[in-house]
Image: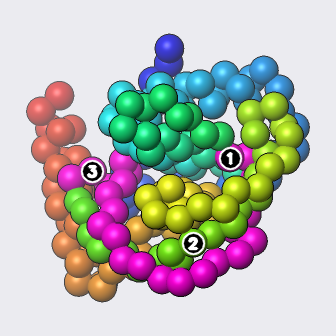
Amino acid sequence: MALLNILHFPDPRLRLKAVPVTGVDDALRQLLRDMFDTMYAAPGIGLAATQVNVQKRLMVIDVSEDKNEPRVFINPVVTERRGEEEMDEGCLSVPGFYETVRRAEWIRVSALDADGRPFELETDGLLAVCIQHEIDHLDGKLFVDYLSTLKRDRIRRKLEKDARHETASR
């Protein structure tokens, strides 16, 4: 079990756009296992590779209550969206903050699984929101980008202050 370092906003590496995965091998599957370990330990329900400073288009998600439904999405693409809903979102890269974000209510996503096999999924609710949130990470976008400049700046200042205090206390 390897826990990876999660980048925190406003780290500029969170703004990098991930590149498509060209092949699934044992090293990639190990990265996925490490990402699940990191996500569960955080604790969280989703983690994109860009959040752990890996610029590849892959993400892991588990929105189940018992944390027993791990899902892998490699090169995910939302191919269809319907409706709109608002949901409170948090983020492992923006710890301690939860804000209301508007996203598609229902989505169809296509991706590859951990063995490189293509699949399609139609979903709504929390899983749809989580998929959209993690794909945003792969595109260099954070949930704070949906907020007003005032709220985003307040969050950034607070996290920068916390990081300074953490560094000073070491």
List the residue tagged with mark 1.
73
Question: In the image, which residues are magenta?
Answer: 73-96
User: How far across and how far down the image is residue 85, in percent?
Assistant: 42, 79
Position of 93 with respect to 128 (left or right) is left
Question: As rendered, which of 153 and 141 lies closer to the eye?
Answer: 141
Tag 3 secondary structure: strand
Where 160 sits versus 105, above or below? above
Q: Residue at x 48, y 29 (%)?
A: 68
Q: Residue at x 36, y 48 (%)?
A: 92
Mark 1 or 3, nearer chain start: 1
The main secondary structure of the magenta stretch is strand
Position of 85 with respect to 163 (left or right) is right
How far is disc 1 from disc 3 in space, using C-alphas?
23 Å
Rendered-image quadrant of the C terminus: top left
List the residue tagged with mark 3.
95
Q: Residues within 10 Å of mark 2 (few under 14, many from 20)?
A: many
